[in-house]
Each structure stands twice: as structure tokens, then as C-alpha cells.
Image (spheres, coloured by chain):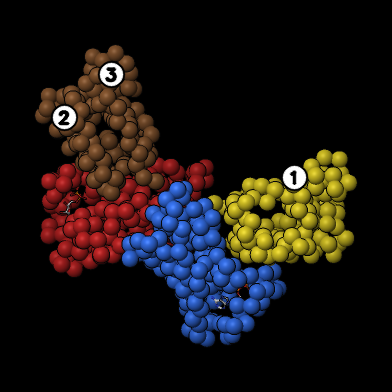
Chain colours: A yellow, B blue, C red, D brown
């Protein structure tokens, strides 16, 4: 099963929805598209919705950390929501939540970034 | 030994998903829990990705072999082999967050994940000869696993 | 050649479903139609079953190997090999409804199905050495296939 | 995916519903259970509903032909209904329908065997 990606802008917030499996093969593709969006749109913050992500390995962690750095260096924030239970272990191991904010869902995340959801 | 399979495939990234789903299909006969399937798929994905990126440095015409043996006591053994560059310093490589390719946004977590998700991980590597990982995992005995 | 895999597994009947679903997963990258997937799964099942029942006479500790190669022009090549008893008279064996084991309710349709579902079928067999089947199929080029 | 079997008696008719994949491995098991049912129940005719059968190879044809012979030798009839499209090719090749009657669904089949459905 591959990876499906969905990008939508809400004011200055880029909402990224991923579904399926994120491994090294898909991470190479995702990095390209995501960086393209960050360049093309006037993006300040990014919300990442992982509700339909059923598989991720360390390549996924790598591409998330990479975008986190780029977004924060540009003065923005990356907020992750709806982390699927099957990803729990690998997220805990990566310590990602020590540096990336987790919100319950897109509404809360948008709200926290000052955007009417 | 209850059953055994050996899968050899080209070192192209398209085969990462194929490799882990094949191993998952093979261990299904042990009625693993959802978590156990996810953990085994993850370690296979990590090992295969390491062979592609590090072992073969993205050369797509090499081969990776996975041997999977399952036993009546619901134990799983995975042997994953490449004939690639080999690992200079295994101790260093196993360091959490250590990666020789940070420029590729590698998180250096592959071996830590294998350590954590499996009961045992043995790494055998010889420079310019290749690397073999042997991992074992005892699946829980409860019958109420979904498959 | 676009991609290649080789699968070796024990000659136990539990592995029939595993073998055909693995080949189906591998050819998925060619976006085959539902019918094409069913046809290829069927010929794999027939060939593997023949190796188990006829080649190895139900001895479960032998091995069957499937090599699958796929090409950019959407052609599929399957090579299925056993080291079993071999076929005495290939011409007779290919006869529709011919079976050497009617007592096992064998319908004698295996080779006819392989002939019909694939574009070509080559049978190489040597007594007490084993049997190798080489089958090829050109998948339709339309992109609207489901996968 | 294995094979699921369901056997129910309707007066003197045994209704067999198969779902999943029928290959050599599953055929060996099916033969056992089916023959057991034929012995235990007072079975005259058999209706085989293949609506949920998604895969069958020649081993499946073999076990069906085997039961057909046993049932007709005992003076009964085997009627098949709801053949899934994916089985069409292999059924046509086997010429099964030259000797085994095909009905649209269980009701018609039961009716044709004199049982109020
Ligand atoms: N099959 C391999 N062949 C050669 N080197 C490897 C192999 N697997 C791992 N390594 C080395 O071990 C290091 C750590 O691997 P890992 O923990 O998976 O992290 P990452 O893949 O993110 O770098 C790699 O950066 C690489 O230097
Ligand atoms: N791998 C094999 N090794 C030895 N004999 C074989 C093999 N495959 C087929 N045969 C022979 O060819 C005959 C026809 O095979 P097939 O058309 O598949 O019919 P069936 O399997 O129903 O007998 C078999 O009965 C057997 O005698």
C-alpha cells in the first residue's frame, strides 16, 4: 500500500493529510512535494494530520524532522494531530513529541495557530 | 521448524513495501497480534532500507535476501543479508541517532528500532563483503490474536 | 528488466496461498487488471500444487522456488522449479483431464489452465531430478487497471 | 485468505456456502467436512452457493466433481448457484456446467428441488 498525500491551505496554515504507509521509498517522494508546497504557498505554520497513516518507519521520522527544522527556521510551527495508535511506539522512541506539539485534531490545531477552523 | 521461506529481490526502494508485506503474510500463520505484525514489518523495512541506502549506496542492480523461519512455539527468526559495503564500526552504528548520512535526513534510529521491536539482534558485517542481520522474536502464545 | 524476485519455500500445502499472494503483490507494480491477477494467482497455485503432490509426493521437507521477472513493457515471466520425481511423459501429462492421481480427485486440468491463462508454457523435466515450468504473460497496456 | 464453510440443512437438502479461496490445501479439509455431513445428515440433494468464493484452482474443481459423483450415485442432485465472476473462466474450462445444474440463487435451487424456500 503506498502513501496518499493531501495538501490544503487555511489562511497561512498548510494542512498536510497523509494516509497509507510512509517508508523510505515514499519519504523521498513526500519530501519533494512538501518542500515544493512550502516554496509555492505563503506558508507560516503546518498542521500534519496522521489519522489515516497505518505504517511508518524511521524514514518517516526523518522526513518529519527535516520539515520541522525548515518550518521552525522560517519562524513557523509544525503541529501534529491524530497520531494513529500503530505509530505510537515509533513516535515515542523518536522523542518527536518532546520537540513537536501534538494536538487532538485539526480544529484544535488551527485554533491554537490563530485560524478560525 | 514449522515453516521456512527465503525471498531475494532487487535493491530498489519499490521493493521495501513488497518485502515487509511478504514477511507479514508469511508469519500470519502464527496468528500474530496487530502490534507484532507492525513491529516485524517495521524491522524488515528498516533492514531492507539500510541495505539499499548504506549497503548498496542506492545502486539498484544488487540483491537483498530475507530468510524467515517460524517455529511451533511461535518464535520468528529473520535473517537479512546484503553483499554491500559493510559496516566499519558496528558499535558506533548501533548508537541511537548515529547516522553516516545525515544529509539524507536519516534519523539514525534503524538499529534502535530493531533492538526495541525484536527480542534479539545480531549484526555480522565485513567491509566490502556485506552485512547480515539475525533477529528473533517470540510471539505471544495467546490464541485470541487477529490475523 | 524492471524488477525481479525469487521466492523459495517449504513444499507444504499451507504455502500455496502464500506463494500466489506473494507473486500477486509483486506484479501489482504493473497495474494488472483483476482478471490478470486471478489468472496469474491460479497458474502459480497450479504449479506449486503440482510440485507438492506430484513432484514431492507430499513430502513436506522439500523446497519449491518461484522466480518472477517483470519488464517495462508489462511482460511477466514466471519460473517455478522443484527437485522432485520429474515427469515421465510430458506430452501425456499435458493432455487435458489426464492425471496420474485420480484417486486424489485430481481433475487433470493444471497444465490446461496454465496453457489457457498464460501466453506461453515451457515444461522441462528430468526423472528423479525435478521439473521446471517457464510461463510468460503480456499484461494489457491500458493504464485504467485497478491495483 | 483461507476458506470459510457453512453447512445448513433445509428438509432433505444440504446447503453448502463457501467463502474465500479454495485451493489444494483447503480442498483436503473441505472434502473431509463435506463427506462427514453427507454421512451424518439425511442428505438427498445438495445446493452449493459460491457467491463469496473469490479464488478457486483445479483442486476446487476436483473436490466438486468428487462430491457430484457421490451425490448422484446416491440418487441425489448437486445444484450450484451464484458463481462469482472471477471463477467464470475456470468453470467454463472444466465443462462443469455440462453435467452440474446452475441456478440463479438458493431460492430457485431449493424450489427446483421441491423445497419451500
Ligand atoms: N546494511 C548496511 N550496510 C552498510 N552500512 C550500514 C548498513 N546498515 C546500517 N549501516 C550503517 O549503520 C548506520 C546506522 O544505521 P541505522 O541505525 O539504520 O540509521 P540510519 O539508517 O538512519 O543511518 C548507518 O548510518 C550506516 O552507516
Ligand atoms: N511438478 C511435477 N512433478 C512431477 N509430475 C508432475 C508435476 N506436475 C505435473 N505432473 C504430472 O502431470 C500430470 C498432469 O498434471 P496437471 O495437469 O496439473 O493435473 P493434476 O495435477 O490434476 O494431475 C500429473 O498428474 C502428474 O502426473
Alpha carbon distance from label 2 to label 3: 16 Å
User: Sequence order check: which comes first, mark 2 or mark 3?
Assistant: 2
In the rendered structure, the answer to whether residue B100 lies left or right of residue A106 reads left
Chain of the residue on which disc 3 is drawn: D
- Of all chains, the one bearing label 1 is A
Secondary structure found at label 1? loop
Which dot, 2 or 1, sits closer to the camera? 1
**Residue that numbered label 3 is attached to:** D110
Q: Nearer the viewer, mark 1 or mark 3?
A: 1
Q: Residue furthest front?
A: B142
Q: Which residue is mark 1?
A: A105
Q: CA distance from mark 2 to mark 1?
A: 61 Å
Q: Which residue is mark 2?
A: D71
Residue D96 place in picture, x, y as percent: 22, 33
The residue tagged with tag 2: helix, strand or loop?
helix
Do badges 2 and 3 share one subunit? Answer: yes
Determine the quadrant in which ligand 1 lies: bottom right
Residue drawn at point x = 67 percent, y = 73 percent:
B97
Residue under disc 1 on the same chain as residue under disc 3: no
User: In the rendered image, which quarter is residue A115 located in?
Assistant: top right
Residue C35 falls in image quadrant:
top left
Amino acid at each position: 500500500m503506498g502513501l496518499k498525500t493531501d495538501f490544503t491551505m487555511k489562511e497561512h496554515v498548510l494542512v498536510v493529510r497523509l494516509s497509507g504507509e510512509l517508508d523510505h521509498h515514499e519519504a523521498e517522494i513526500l519530501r519533494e512535494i512538501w518542500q515544493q508546497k512550502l516554496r509555492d504557498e505563503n506558508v507560516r505554520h503546518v498542521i500534519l494530520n496522521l489519522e489515516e497513516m497505518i505504517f511508518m518507519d524511521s524514514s518517516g521520522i526523518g522526513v518529519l524532522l527535516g520539515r520541522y527544522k525548515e518550518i521552525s527556521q522560517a519562524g513557523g510551527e509544525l503541529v501534529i494531530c491524530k497520531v494513529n495508535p500503530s505509530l505510537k511506539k515509533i513516535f515515542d522512541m523518536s522523542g518527536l513529541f518532546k520537540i513537536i506539539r501534538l494536538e487532538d485534531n485539526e480544529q484544535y490545531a488551527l485554533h491554537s495557530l490563530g485560524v478560525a477552523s | 521448524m514449522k515453516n521456512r521461506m527465503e525471498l531475494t529481490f532487487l535493491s530498489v526502494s519499490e521493493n521495501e513495501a513488497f518485502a515487509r508485506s511478504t514477511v507479514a503474510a508469511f508469519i500470519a500463520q502464527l496468528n500474530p497480534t496487530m502490534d507484532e505484525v507492525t513491529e516485524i514489518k517495521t524491522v524488515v523495512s528498516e533492514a531492507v532500507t539500510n541495505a539499499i541506502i548504506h549497503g548498496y549506496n542506492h545502486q539498484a542492480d544488487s540483491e537483498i535476501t530475507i530468510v524467515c523461519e517460524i517455529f511451533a512455539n511461535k518464535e520468528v527468526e529473520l535473517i537479512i543479508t546484503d553483499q554491500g559495503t559493510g559496516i566499519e564500526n558496528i558499535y558506533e552504528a548501533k548508537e541511537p541517532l548515529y547516522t553516516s548520512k545525515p544529509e539524507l535526513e536519516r534519523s539514525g534510529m534503524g538499529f534502535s528500532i530493531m533492538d526495541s521491536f525484536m527480542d534479539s539482534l545480531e549484526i555480522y558485517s565485513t567491509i566490502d563483503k556485506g552485512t547480515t542481520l539475525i533477529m528473533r522474536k517470540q510471539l505471544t502464545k495467546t490464541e485470541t490474536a487477529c490475523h
